[in-house]
């Protein structure tokens, strides 16, 4: 699975850049404002119309929690991945009703359950605001001044747009700062769960099969958006491809790839290879083992840890694939050769030769980032309770400033989304929070050393576990009303030990945050210059690095060769039973009881999963796969292991996007889940 | 479980030091040459006779692979832990016969199976050679010269003793170099497996229950030693305590604690807390996840990985307990206070005040160790095949020098033991070796950076996985005859890619080895001075830090308080079934089928496990627990979670040694395993 969420939590924002300009085959995560009409015409004979593109854009949905989806009925049905929905399924579950394991089905609207904190975004318009942003940065501004000016003008543009249109308005930095676009979204916040299969069906084969192919997963879930307490009336939704997609067919993916790093210089990739990824992997393995130990404590603990555990394992496997790619000398040799050739051209040009220093600047920034790596005075988002405390404390401090001078997440135009997360009624389990926070405290001690004065202040003379227990037990933030009171009256922060902890950390947090912001700005400026130089040499007909905004990818349904074997593009539902038998129903190779109970009812030749050459990455999870007629043919849920270097480069040799076939969704609803009427609603 | 082996492989040798001299209650791992007769007399009214001690010493057995045991019959039966035997059980297993999972029983001598590479040691004499060792170090020798001279004289003493007596002869450094003793061992190398229970019985509750109490594990295995092809005739063996040990009884543990660090200065403990343990834990978690991923590939892979996986999980849990202790500020505060008081006394004494600089020297060494941490040009013992290649290459180089100038493991007097390991017929699985070696190559790249010339030479332009596959496939070292040929003719090393790899690494390996040896020697000299100062102030009536040599601990059978509850000292066999039911037979809480089949036959009130206050540590696994009459009452197999800080200090408040009750062994043999005649042989 390629859910974006955890990746974002773990990796600090690395979101800028531009795609390599020497495009390979079906490469590209294209802006809807600059679609690759010529390539589609010449390679596939497909004529892209504005109506087609507009329809696809408006049918696409972003899960603001990290993931993609589409409208699939006029009645507000939204189709995404089970693993995108799992955060919500986890939050809706109780010891009595484990929706994440057992699935869910609401036969009537009345039985649909409201998600506690989902925000779904439908992109409705895109506006180029590059000139406005650049005009706000005074000539000769220092790095810090430029960053501040840019942040301020972006905030201002967003606020103005929000006031004028009522739409969520985000200024997006593209091409590493060469372009700025204003994206406006219609927001849906009344989102209700309609149907989810069991994890055994959605994630059949578990961690072992994850990022592998062939696969046999029904990794889908249906939500419904409501407006004014009624199912929303949706004008643009995807119809179902009745014929079924075939080998070789042209397909499109419309979704929100989270982050790619294809513009990265050789030095930036080496920083990832030698510093950042080893660090992140150590951290993920630490959490993975922690979750395993916690899960041992019993069935209920296992349930509580499940969603986080899945996310961790998924990220660990993804990053392992990435570092394996980077550790292959032949991969970086190619990058080195291309970069050297480009730099040679640049240095040979009187107009461009000054741009070469941008590569040196990136290299210099990597060195400083390596020194900063692992330094943190925040315990992040792993503990919900800590994250709430941190948000409240920082919000109180930021709100004293004008909106445009605040840290981006605290600006006025983003407040509604922030509050939805902050006041989420999702359950918080004190024992689980204690385990997570204790580990963060221990890590803090390890990274700074136990003698560090801040560590000693944070631990207050206690062991990490005792201190975490005391903080969690003493905090009132489990109570949503308390959170609201604390937000309204910062004087109350004195009474909460967890908020006092955040306050102890705050000066160091801000020091590190500023250092990191400055490095980001320096890098942004360097990449903007690199982009200018590259564009001067190679032209602009390309796509920017992914930014968790809507993109269109294209490709064809196509198998591949692996270890001398041909991997066929399609699997079918009967194959899932064979796959289970081949693994003796062991570990996670157990189909749910419902599949066995209804085996005789299932049309076993219904296609279940398929692969295509579309260029996707984490964040694309749940993206609709669409045929030339604009109909739904599948739902992206994974990339194969060879695609994990997609962060850095695209290849169509073996890299494949993995989708659930649309027909399997309907067949499963009808034949396994007793949800025929829901199946009939799809596409209508 | 507290098996020493993995700990040794992972942690570089840290074996020196001296016990804290302010003894707590039942503290101490006593030398058989200096037993705590006075304490035993005053605290327990027990009179220790030379005969008693001699009998216990000669009845004790060391598993040279890492672990302890005892002779339990005149017919050569040796009783140890299942988890000490598991290395052998793993090596004897095949896809068809999985002795580690399914257990083993040889009803006749003819059916007993020879262990491929076990060496068992019976300590027969101890001689103080301190004067001889010290005399060999010239006055005014540099650190390096002193180390060399000491190594040389130790080798010489060992070789002379071996020649004179035929016994394995090891000079052991005690009290951080304040004393040197020559230990002579009778070696048994024809060791055959007689009986082992299923892992489900031996390690009931798995990783989750490990280091917890109450426990319900039959963690025992029986071997038999042979001489001249016949069961050895054993004069000193332990009889069984027929009455059964009771709450409050005085008990002794005679075994080989591997390593303690109780002499460590505050700075040395901080180095562990902030540097070494975080590093080791990252490494262990890395291997743990790797083994889990490999095990997913199938039942046979799971079987191949099992023993290593257990060892890794065990070490990870043990080190987690240790670091948790060190991260508790109150723990180090106490140490700091004691050390400050001691230093004050030393500085106030005109004769002793120069000794204070030894603490500074230890601190200086820790700083250099932190810089060296993670630097390695060896892929260690994780891959058997690599370890064989490395041994052969280093042996060829070392053998050009006189025995006393070689690295310790290559001296002539140790050659027989080295060759037994080197030519072991234990199975080696190319796919498993490839996975292990690939991960070591990746780690090497991460630690040194992918641009490091040595990394590039080692990877030879390939990804870690491709390179590892090439090395393993190209090597002939799976074949024992090839190993012998390579040992006999170093010119053949040219033909083996794995040995070529070792050769590429060798100069850097030797550079780092020398650096590390010098730091060790500086630390040894500093601790020797610290010991002198401490002895001058507090006297000598104490025990040295553990050195994986025979020690006697004592204490009483005693429960403890935990989280407000009283934990009773005994569990019984019926309790194992209750424990299984309480966990719904989930995960590793599944008793084997044999226990269920014979439930009606078992005397369910037979005591199964018990705890005592004896001072033990990793390496003590399998140690006999003995009553005042010198009879066997139990077999050590674990410490509780509170005992994991035992490396650094002893406490009898909650720390407990966990044993299998001797009666459970006999009851299980008779009532579950159909081995009544074997049960009757025990103690006779």
Image (cartoon, coloured by chain):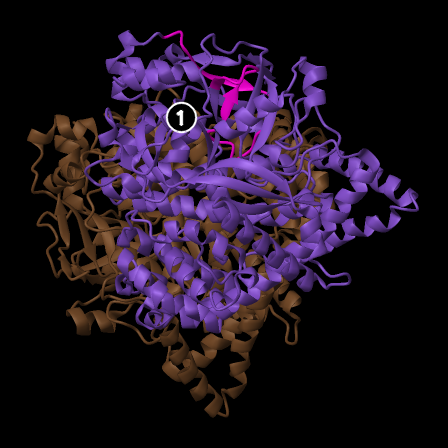
Chain colours: A brown, B purple
Residue A159 visible in the shown view:
yes
Circle 1 residue: B219
- Furthest-front residue in view? B164
Q: Quadrant of residue A664?
A: top left
**Number of other residues with Cα within 10 Å of mark 1, as a class: few under 14, some 14 to 19, many 20 or more:** many
Residue depicted at 22% across the width and 40% down the height = A218
In terms of depth relative to the viewer, which is nearer, B437 or A258?
B437
Residue A181 visible in the shown view:
no
In terms of depth relative to the viewer, which is nearer, B386 or A459?
B386
The chain under label 1 reads: B
Magenta span: predominant SS is: loop
Q: Vertically, is B141 above or below A94? A: below
Is A228 situated left or right of B45 in this image?
A: left
Instruction: Give SS at disc 1.
Output: loop
Q: Which residues are magenta?
A: B604-633
Residue depicted at 74% across the width and 36% down the height = B335
Q: Position of residue A109 (x, y in %)?
A: 28, 27
Q: Vertically, is A610 above or below A37? A: above
Q: Position of residue A133 (x, y in %)?
A: 54, 66
Q: Quadrant of residue B443?
A: bottom left
In terms of depth relative to the viewer, which is nearer, A75 or B391?
B391
> Within the magenta stretch, is there residue B628?
yes
Residue depicted at 23% across the width and 72% down the height = A39
Q: Vertically, is A182 above or below A2? A: below
Q: Position of residue A205 (x, y in %)?
A: 25, 40
Q: Position of residue B310 (x, y in %)?
A: 40, 37
> Within the magenta stretch, is there residue A171?
no
Is B406 situated left or right of A451 in this image?
A: left
Q: Vertically, is A606 above or below A645? A: above
């Amino acid at each position: 699975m390629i859910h974006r969420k955890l990746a974002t939590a773990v990796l600090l924002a690395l979101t800028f850049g531009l795609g390599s300009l020497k495009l390979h085959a079906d490469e590209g995560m294209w802006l809807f404002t600059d679609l690759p009409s010529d390539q589609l015409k010449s390679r596939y004979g497909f004529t892209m119309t504005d109506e087609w593109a507009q329809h696809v854009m408006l049918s696409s949905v972003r899960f603001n929690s990290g993931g993609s989806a589409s409208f699939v009925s006029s009645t507000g049905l939204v189709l995404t991945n089970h693993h995108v929905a799992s955060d919500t399924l986890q939050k809706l579950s109780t010891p009595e009703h484990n929706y994440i394991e057992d699935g869910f089905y609401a036969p009537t609207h009345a039985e649909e359950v409201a998600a506690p904190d989902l925000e779904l975004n439908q992109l409705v318009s895109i506006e180029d605001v590059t000139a406005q942003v650049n005009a706000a940065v005074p000539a000769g501004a220092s790095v810090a001044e430029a960053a501040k000016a840019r942040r301020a003008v972006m905030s201002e543009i967003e606020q103005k747009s929000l006031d004028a249109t009522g739409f969520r308005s985000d200024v997006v930095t593209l091409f590493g700062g060469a372009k700025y676009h204003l994206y406006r979204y219609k927001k849906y916040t009344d989102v209700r769960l309609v149907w989810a299969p069991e994890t055994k069906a959605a994630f059949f084969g578990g961690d072992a099969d994850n990022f592998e192919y062939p696969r046999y997963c029904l990794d889908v879930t249906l939500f419904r958006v409501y407006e004014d307490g009624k199912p929303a009336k949706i004008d643009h939704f995807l119809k179902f491809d009745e014929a079924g997609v075939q080998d070789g067919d042209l397909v499109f993916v419309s979704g929100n790839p989270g982050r790619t790093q294809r513009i990265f210089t050789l030095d930036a990739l080496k920083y990832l290879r030698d510093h950042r990824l080893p660090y992140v992997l150590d951290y993920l393995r630490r959490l993975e083992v922690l979750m395993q130990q916690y899960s041992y404590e019993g069935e209920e603990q296992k349930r509580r840890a499940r969603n986080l555990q899945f996310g961790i394992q998924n990220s660990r496997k993804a990053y392992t694939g990435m570092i394996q790619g980077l550790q292959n000398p032949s991969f970086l040799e190619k990058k080195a050769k291309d970069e050297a050739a480009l730099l040679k051209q640049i240095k040979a040009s009187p107009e461009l030769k000054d741009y070469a220093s941008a590569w040196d600047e990136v290299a210099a920034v990597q060195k400083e980032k390596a020194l900063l790596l692992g330094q943190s005075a925040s315990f992040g988002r792993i503990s919900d309770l800590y994250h709430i405390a941190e948000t409240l404390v920082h919000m109180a401090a930021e709100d004293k400033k004008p909106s445009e001078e605040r840290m981006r997440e605290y600006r006025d135009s983003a407040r509604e989304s922030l509050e939805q997360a902050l006041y989420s009624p999702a359950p918080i389990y004190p024992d689980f929070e204690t385990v997570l926070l204790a580990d963060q405290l221990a890590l803090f001690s390890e990274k700074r050393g136990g003698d560090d004065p801040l560590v000693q202040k944070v631990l207050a003379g206690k062991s990490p576990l005792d201190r975490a227990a005391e903080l969690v037990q003493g905090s009132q933030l489990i109570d949503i009303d308390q959170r609201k009171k604390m937000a309204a009256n910062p004087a109350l922060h004195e009474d909460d030990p967890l908020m006092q902890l955040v306050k102890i950390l705050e000066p160091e947090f801000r020091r590190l945050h500023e250092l990191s912001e400055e490095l980001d700005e320096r890098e942004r400026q360097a990449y903007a210059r690199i982009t200018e130089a590259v564009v001067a040499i190679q032209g602009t007909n390309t796509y920017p690095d992914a930014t968790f905004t809507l993109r269109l990818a294209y490709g064809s349904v196509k198998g591949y060769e692996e270890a001398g074997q041909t991997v066929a593009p399609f699997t079918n539902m009967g194959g899932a039973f064979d796959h289970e038998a081949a693994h003796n129903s062991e570990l996670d190779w157990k189909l749910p009881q419902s599949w066995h109970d209804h085996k005789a009812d299932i049309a076993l030749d219904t296609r279940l999963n398929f692969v295509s050459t579309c260029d996707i990455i984490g964040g694309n999870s749940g993206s609709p796969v669409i045929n030339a007629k604009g109909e739904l043919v599948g739902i992206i849920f994974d990339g194969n292991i060879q695609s994990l270097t997609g962060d850095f480069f695209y290849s169509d040799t073996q890299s494949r996007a993995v989708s659930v076939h649309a027909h399997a969704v309907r067949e499963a609803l009808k034949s396994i889940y007793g949800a025929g009427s829901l199946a009939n609603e799809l596409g209508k």
